[in-house]
Image (tube, rainbow, N blue to C red):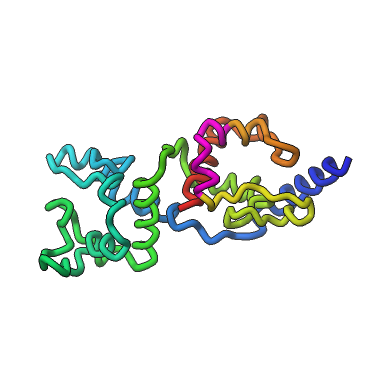
Amino acid sequence: MKFLIYTVILLTILAVNPLAVSATLPPAYEGRGLYVSYCQLCHGISGKGDGPLAKAMKITPANLTTTVRSRSDAILIKIITGKGRQTITGRDRHNLLSDAMPEWKDIFNESQLMSLIAYLRFLGNTKHDLMGDPKAGLQIYQKYCQVCHGVEGDGDGIMTKLMGIMPMDHTNKNETSRLNNNDLVKSILDGKGRFMPAWRGILSQSDVEALVSYIRLLSH
């Protein structure tokens, strides 16, 4: 009975004002938008340097899934913007990875650079592909998930104190990375434990895939 009451309260909150609180978008989410607009044509969807423009131009962009891992944010900023030289050899940071790498110093501001780097880190570290469109996933997350999992995804939603629960912290990649995409899809569709509701019949398969993709970006 108590759980039923909580469920009714939860659904009432969702129905009345599902987007009551606006989140600060995770850097990797914003960075993905920049990557798609400016980088994907050459570096490819997965960042491996196999984009359609690269093939047309017969160039070999860096494989970002490997090269980014060993470089600091400061070095990546210099490579992306073309500003600055290596301290030891004196070579330009720009074109360090590829002669065809454009200079983006007049395109991206500091916040955008850090968001882009956050997404590059995701490409270099993730074990899981993005199944769907994170942009659609953001809207679904705000409507159905943030009331428990929190506006920022860290598990401090408005319902947690009322119900005495501790939802998964989606910003903790140690928690989310151990689950593959199918595990997350199943948990969302069929529910898990006493308090994670089943969304089958409410969310479609494509909705859930978009939602999983957004969750992946929350931890970067």
Left or right side of 23 for 39 = left
- Residues in magenta? 173-185
Left or right side of 63 for 143 = right
Quadrant in the picture for residue 72? bottom left
Q: How many marks?
A: 0
Residue sitting at x 56%, y 30%: 205
| x and y, in percent, of residue 78 in the image | 23, 64
Towards the viewer: 122 or 87: 87
Residue sitting at x 73%, y 50%: 165
Towards the viewer: 197 or 53: 197
Left or right side of 55 for 153 = right
- Magenta span has 82? no
Towards the viewer: 202 or 166: 166
Residue sitting at x 33%, y 40%: 46
| x and y, in percent, of residue 197 in the image | 71, 38
Judged by its main secondary structure, the magenta piece is helix
In this picture, is 195 found above or below 94? above
Quadrant where the image shows the N terminus:
top right
| x and y, in percent, of residue 97 in the image | 17, 52
Which residue appears farthest toward the right when viewing the image?
1
Towards the viewer: 19 or 58: 58
- Magenta span has 175? yes
| x and y, in percent, of residue 213 in the image | 49, 42
Residue sitting at x 59%, y 60%: 22
In this picture, is 45 found above or below 146? above
